[in-house]
Image (cartoon, rainbow, N blue to C red):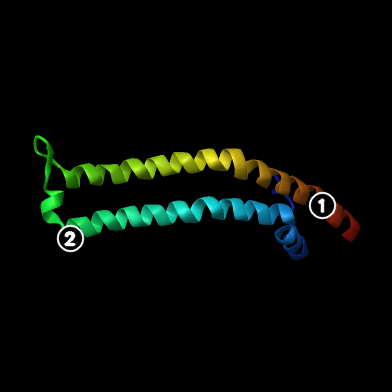
Amino acid sequence: MTPPPEPAPEQFARIEESPEFRQLRSSFRNFAFPVTAGFVLWYLLYVLLSCYAPDLMSTKVVGNINLALVLGLLQFASTFAIAAWYARHAGRRLDPRAAVIRGRAAAVVPAVEESAE
């Protein structure tokens, strides 16, 4: 099986300058940056509370389970929730746009190679 033809650097530049590609990047950034910032702040809150509020974090919630353990487990839960949220966002908004851009690029590449022969 032969690999698909590679676009020339000029094709990449044209793709990057296209409004569709800019919209794709903007959609990715508008999702990724705020979610990343929110998660980092949530993680830092957990670390800061662990360091500077040990009495609060040692508060018993149920039996021997304290607030630190609950918040620590919520870190894992939020990580998986964000991953699922991103997969859904990518499937609905990013992947279809990327497929259109990829299809246009693939349609242009063979024409360029044929004209070069």
Label 1 is placed on what type of residue?
Answer: Val
Mark number displayed over residue 60: none
Mark number displayed over residue 51: 2
Q: Position of residue 26 (x, y in %)?
A: 61, 55
Q: Is residue 117 visible?
A: no
What residue is shown at x 56% (from left), y 43% (from top)?
90
Pick whichever, 59 or 103, lies toward us.
59
The image quadrant of residue 81 is: top left
- Does residue 20 lie above or below 1 as drawn? below
Q: Is residue 36 left or right of residue 59?
A: right
| Element class at badge 1 | helix
Q: Which residue is mark 1?
A: 108
The image quadrant of residue 49 is: bottom left
Q: Is residue 76 visible?
A: yes
Dot 1 crowding, Cα within 10 Å, few <14, some 14–19, many 20+ = few
Q: Is residue 65 left or right of residue 22?
A: left
Dot 2 crowding, Cα within 10 Å, few <14, some 14–19, many 20+ = few
What residue is shown at x 67% (from left), y 57% (from top)?
22
Label 2 is placed on what type of residue?
Answer: Cys
What residue is shown at x 70% (from left), y 60% (from top)?
16
The image quadrant of residue 78 is: top left
